[in-house]
Image: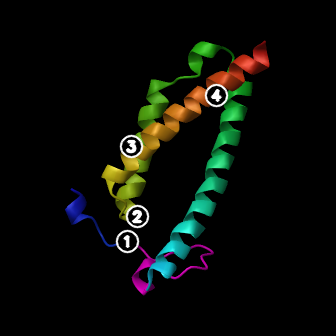
Amino acid sequence: MDDARPPTPKAAGPFVAPDPDACETMKDVRQGVDEIDRMLVALIARRQGYMDAAARIKPNRDVVRDEARINQVLGNVKAEAARMGLSWGIAEPVWRELMERCISYEFDVWDATRE
């Protein structure tokens, strides 16, 4: 249950913005959110690169959508979310939508590279 999740671990990356617990103003909060958004864009762009690779590697279109892999990713994310104190109520719909958009993108790339 989300109410019983462990405390959020301290940032372990190259963050410039103050930690959430150290924010004193909305400017601090917005600085942190903007910094995270830039990092997320970079990470999602890299993830998209793996969709390009998958489209190149997969031998036929009917293996683009892989339900077993979708479930595996969700299980991995759920475990990591719990470990990091991220609400599953936030994580699950974000990853489901991310995966659906990535699958759609991969279909488009697969089709475009086989025409």
Q: CA distance from mark 4 to mark 1?
A: 34 Å
From the top left corner, tell me how far across and down residue 33 is, in percent.
51, 68
Q: Nearer the viewer, residue 30 or 78?
A: 30
Q: Which residue is disc 2 drawn over? A: 84
Q: Residue at x 77, y 14 (%)?
A: 114
Residue drawn at (45%, 79%), measured in percent from left and top? 26
Q: Position of residue 105 (x, y in %)?
A: 63, 30
Q: Is residue 45 left or right of residue 101?
A: right
Compared across the picture, whether 98 is left or right of 80 comes to right
Query: From where the camera sits, is residue 73 visible?
Result: no
Mark toward the viewer: 2 or 3: 3
112 shown above or below 43? above
The residue lying at 66 percent from left, 23 percent from top is 108
Above or below: residue 114 compared with residue 96: above
Proximity of marks 4 and 2: CB atoms separated by less than 8 Å: no
Q: Earlier in the sequence, mark 4 or mark 2?
A: 2
